[in-house]
Image (cartoon, rainbow, N blue to C red):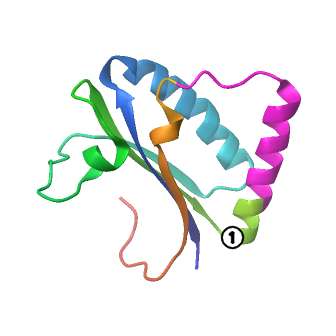
Amino acid sequence: MSYVDGFVLAVPTANRERYEAVARKFDAMLVEHGALRVVEAWGDDVPHGKRTDFHRATEATNDETIVFSWAEWPDRQTRDAAHAAMEKLMSESGEPMDMPFDGARMITGGFATLLDLGGRA
């Protein structure tokens, strides 16, 4: 089964276009390095919970929108090789990406697929 990288972050709503531009560039690199699919989802119906929620988890402010994204890989080995190659490319370029959000508040993790039902939209 496939392997998935998941991301949750808070992006200043005013930076939506900048975020999309950075995401297009970065996500294209993921696909070039073997990602099967990359999805960026701009928060549209992200409720505040009573105990926990995406807003608390990312310390989002009222002028930020929650973004949920994921990259699907054929397997973890492909993902690990892609991450290593991309880290090397970015360190060799010497130019940090101009991120339009606070990366320290981003939640990220890799997940082995447990169950995959249905088709793609």
Q: Is residue 14 above or below residue 2?
A: above
- Locate residue 78: give its quadrant: bottom right
Residue at horizontal 42 percent and vertical 20 percent from the top = 17
Q: Which residue is mark 1?
A: 76
- Find out whether residue 8 is within the magenta segment: no
Left or right: 77 as drawn, with respect to 50: right
- Find out whether residue 98 is within the magenta segment: yes
Question: For this rendering, which residue is in front, 28 or 45?
Answer: 45
On the image, the x and y values in percent for residue 114 come to: 47, 82
Left or right: 100 as drawn, with respect to 67: right
Q: Give neighbour class at mark 1: few <14, some 14-19, many 20+ (Cα, 10 Å).
A: some
Q: State the quadrant of the N terminus.
A: bottom right
Q: State the quadrant of the C terminus.
A: bottom left
On the image, the x and y values in percent for residue 2 come to: 58, 73
Magenta region: 81-99
Question: For this rendering, which residue is in front, 53 or 113?
Answer: 53
Q: Residue furthest right?
A: 92
**Residue type, label 1:** Arg
Q: Residue furthest left?
A: 50
Residue at horizontal 76 percent and vertical 54 percent from the top = 82
Main SS class of the magenta portion in the image? helix
Question: For this rendering, which residue is in front, 89 or 94?
Answer: 94
Q: Is residue 110 above or below residue 59?
A: below
Q: Is residue 102 above or below residue 33?
A: above
On the image, the x and y values in percent for residue 84 come to: 80, 52
